[in-house]
Image: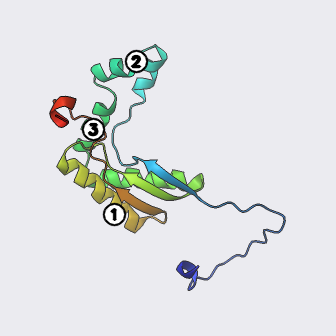
Amino acid sequence: TTKYADKTFEKVIDATGKSVLPGFADGHTHPVWAGDRVHEFAMKLAGASYMDIHKAGGGIGFTVQHTKDASLESLVESFKQRLDRMMKFGTTLVEAKSGYGLELETEVKMLKAIHQADKEHVLDIVSNYCGGHSVPKGKSFQLQFP
């Protein structure tokens, strides 16, 4: 209650006989990324497996490469657009994970995007580093975890 103690409101809503629901807390999302994978939907409809799509250059590897190539500014702007959509559906708290970088520079860029959006957007955002989202291209699970 102290968060809004110094606020004034233009409109008071009488909720007598109504239901008032709390905002949704999205406790696990990776909302900072680049690269549209809508083309994979047709592959899935045609019966392709996730590994088929991955071998064809799609899947998480596609998103990782596009996220790596994206500017910080474009990641912030697309993230804020996603936050706007989340808010329209009732989300008030987002736990935003990195994870589509798979290397230090891009993971840090993603976390910076989350931090910047947190300063600019009304939604409450909690950031979380998730560097082990997938095995990086050119690496193997055995190399990562001997």
Upstream in the sequence, badge 1 or badge 3? 3
- What residue is pinned by disc 2? 49
Distance between mark 1 and mark 3 Cα atoms? 20 Å
| Image quarter hosting the C terminus | top left
Residue 112 vertical position relative to residue 66 in the rendered view, above or below: below
Q: Is residue 132 above or below residue 117?
A: above
Residue 100, visible in the rendered structure = yes
Q: CA distance from mark 3 to mark 2?
A: 19 Å
Residue positioned most to the right: 17
Q: Amino acid at mark 3?
A: Val
The residue that appears at 47% across and 54% down in the rendered structure is: 83
Q: Which x, y percent locates residue 135?
A: 24, 34
Q: Foreground: 118 or 69?
A: 118
**Of marks 3 and 2, which one's residue comes earlier in the chain?**
2
Q: Which mark is residue 116?
A: 1
Which quadrant of the view contains residue 60?
top left
**Residue 86, position in %: x, y?**
53, 52
- Residue at image location 53% in from the left, 78% down from the top: 3
| Residue 142, quarter of the rendered image | top left
- Outermost residue, front side: 146
Give the CA distance from mark 1 to mark 2. 37 Å
Amino acid on which the number 1 mark rests in the picture: Gln
Q: Where does label 3 land, which residue? A: 64
Mark 1 or mark 2: which is in front? 2
* Residue 136, horizontal then vertical, whole percent: 21, 35
The residue type indicated by label 2 comes to: Ser
